Amino acid sequence: MNDSGSPINLVHRYFEQQSELFGEGFFSGKALVKPFLIRDDSEYKVNRRDITVNNSETLDNLYETIKDCTKCALGETRNMFVFGVGNPTADIMFIGEAPGRDEDLKGEPFVGRAGKLLDKMLESIGLNRDIVYIGNILKCRPPQNRDPLPTERDLCEPFLIKQIELIKPKLIVALGRVAAHTLLRTDDTLKSLRESTHNYHGIDFKVTYHPAALLRNQKLKYPAWEDLKDIRDNYL
Ligand code: URA
């Protein structure tokens, strides 16, 4: 019998994830003060799937309309157009910067090293790719993973706005500087942007670190975990 869903295994898996995410010894700190809540998503998922069918047709239509875009030069250099992935009626949307090499080859956001970490971050608060929606500011890879140019952002942003309109999330989470600055039209520091919940056309909007930044700088993992707990406690 498969007992991977038993409470003991879930607790075990939780601790495994936390050490993968935040390193050994992380829980000697204050993170355990508030016990983790194990969510039962089974009914939630079934309900969401029912709604998904109609709405996904609309997102599919949008995909068909824009998938061959050549409005900017990235349309000439990309391998694949990276539209977005997840639940078309998700309550939470995570938005990154732009596809990298792995995403450009696969046509799906966050599938490389940073993506693997994002999956673990989601899992640590009971989420996964089927429950949330994941997208990027740009749908095509900038060469050598350089920062998106202002014109590229301007030309691509309307596609993302349309996706947000169709998905109607309750919360948008910007992963990193580019997503936060593009959507909020600000140059404020990431540190200060993390400190409050913003309003994006009536939708709650939070900012956290990009998973690639967490891979580069271990010290950011604790504040990132604080951000995740905040999302878990207020939106799940
Ligand atoms: N980084 C991003 O911002 N988005 C991806 O899809 C992959 C890496």
Image (cartoon, rainbow, N blue to C red):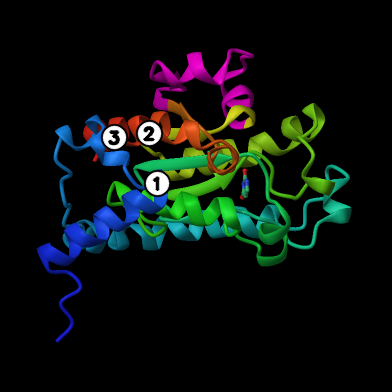
Which residue shows up at 31% across the image and 43% down it?
Answer: 25
Q: On screen, 182 above or below 228?
A: above
Q: Nearer the viewer, residue 226 or 171?
A: 226
In the structure shown, which secondary structural element does the residue marked by tag 1 occupy?
A: loop
Q: CA distance from mark 3 to mark 2?
A: 14 Å
Residue with the mark numbered 1: 23
> Residue 5 in the image: x percent, y percent?
17, 69
Question: Mark 2 against mark 1, which lies toward the viewer?
Answer: 1
Q: Is mark 1 within 8 Å of ligand 1?
A: no
Q: Quadrant of the N terminus?
A: bottom left
182 is within the stretch colored magenta: yes
Q: Residue type at mark 2?
A: Leu
Residue with the mark numbered 3: 229
In the structure shown, which secondary structural element does the residue marked by tag 2 occupy?
A: strand
Q: Residue type at mark 1?
A: Gly
Q: Which residues are magenta?
A: 179-205
Q: Earlier in the sequence, mark 3 or mark 2?
A: 2
**Residue that lies at the very extreme toward the left in this rendered image:** 7
Which residue shows up at 64% across the image and 30% down it?
Answer: 178
Q: Quadrant of residue 33?
A: top left
Mark 1 crowd level (few <14, some 14–19, many ≥20, 10 Å Cα): some
Left or right: 197 in relation to 107: left
Q: Quadrant of the C terminus?
A: top left
Q: Nearer the viewer, residue 9 or 180?
A: 9
In the structure shown, which secondary structural element does the residue marked by tag 3 occupy?
A: helix
> Residue 182 in the image: x percent, y percent?
64, 26
Q: On screen, 78 above or below 206?
A: below
What's the mark number on residue 171?
Answer: 2
Q: On screen, 233 above or below 14?
A: above
> Residue 62 in the image: x percent, y percent?
60, 53
